[in-house]
Amino acid sequence: MEENTVTHRLLLDIAPNAYAIVVVAGMASAGLVLGTLLDQILRRFGIGPQGGSR
Amino acid sequence: MYAGSVPTLSLGLALALVGFCVGVAGSFFGVGGAFLVTPALNILGFPMALAIGTDLAHVTGKSVIAVMRHRKLGHIDWRAGLFLLLGTLPGVKLGAMAVMALEHTSSTDVVLRFTYLAVLTTVGLLMLREALNTRGEDEPGGSPLLRRRLRLKPLVHLPASGIGGISVWGLVLLGLATGFLSAFLGVGGGFIRVPALVYLVGMPTRIAVGTDLLEVAFSGGYGAFLYAREARVDLVAAMVMLLGASVGSQLGALATVYVDPRRIRLYLAIMVLGSAAAVLARQMGLVVVSAIVLWTLALSLAGLILYKLAVAIRAEKSGAGKPRPDEAEVECA
């Protein structure tokens, strides 16, 4: 795949499942970090309800 | 525009903007937003399978953010989410297998686009009719089909949604069907699952939105895994979209608190129908018209949602706004 870098291609060739797990875990972790960060910002500015779950 | 490897500045900005708009809309409607993202990426030059895989990867991260926010708002029915998930994951696997099988033929793009079109148009028209016929802030009336017709045991109670008893099999089958479509069409399944949860299960609209995002996070993650394994994910593009989506998701989820459920369903119907029009235009070779319809739609709805959120927050801060429908629930929690 020309759209992938050499590293990606190597990882894909050697262990495609591991590569795919890293992709998914990386995206989920990035979401977790960004979500927590933005939550803190909204809390700091008092925007929207900040209550806990039911 | 897309030429593989590292995106240009203009492509990067376009991706971040797509992410932001879809983050607002997706978190507000409880959808992954792929019916906007996949055609948008396709128009930007991504091959269809790569567009689907890249979108699913960005949806995984975005849904985590949206679920965190909806959990705080008490908009998630965890029990219903678990049973739906039992069907969703096998459904996603079947859908991805169908796409990979079709990819070996020359008609993949045409088949996907026409399936897209049929599903979007049908769901959009049905929702629009219901939302226009419902008065006030009410949820849809009548007895939900799944609870009326399917009484196969075991039955499960969903107190978070105020539902007394519903067949576990009904929830699992619903998850299976929407999971298949999510992987086959490259969508989170939300634009089908949210209406299904509201109309077939009888779940309140806000709870349906939050619960569906939980499904989207898992089905998106599983779909991304399957596409990444086949080298159909552009990681840089997915991360750039996630940056925009992270801000949009927070704001979209907050807006569900301030907009009445009927309007949420009405806006979703408009969004789905507009997206169908864009896909149809592209199929007819009107690529520019398709892009204009798509971008106008995404920007308008995101703008409308943000406007309503800003007005409500300003009114709330000045003490002049009407009480939020779920204010008491949040405070109790």
Image (tube, coloured by chain):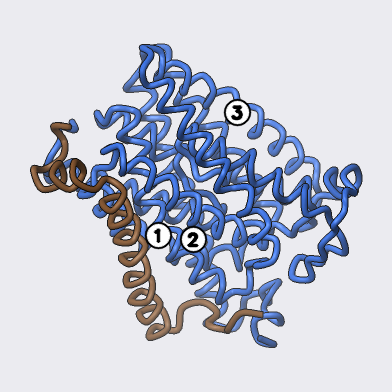
Answer yes or no: is residue B296 visible.
Answer: yes
Which chain contains the residue that carries disc 2? B
Q: Are marks 2 and 3 on the same chain?
A: yes
Are the residues tagged 1 and 2 within 8 Å (C-beta)? yes
For the colour brown, the matching chain is A
Residue B32 percent location from the top left of the image = 48, 49
Q: Position of residue A36 (x, y in %)?
A: 37, 76
Quadrant in the rendering for residue B191: top right
B131 vs B320, nearest the viewer: B131
The spot of residue B6 in percent (x, y) is 11, 44
Foreground residue among A23 and B236: A23
Q: Chain of mark 1?
A: B
The number of numbered discs placed on residues in the rendered structure image is 3
* Quarter holding residue A25: bottom left
Instruction: Check chain identity for marks 1 and 2: say if they share one.
Output: yes
Q: Which chain is blue?
A: B
Query: Looking at the picture, which amino acid does disc 2 mark?
Result: Gly
Callout 2: helix, strand or loop?
Answer: helix
Cα gap from disc 2 to disc 3, whole angstroms:
24 Å
- The foreground one among B11 and A35 is A35
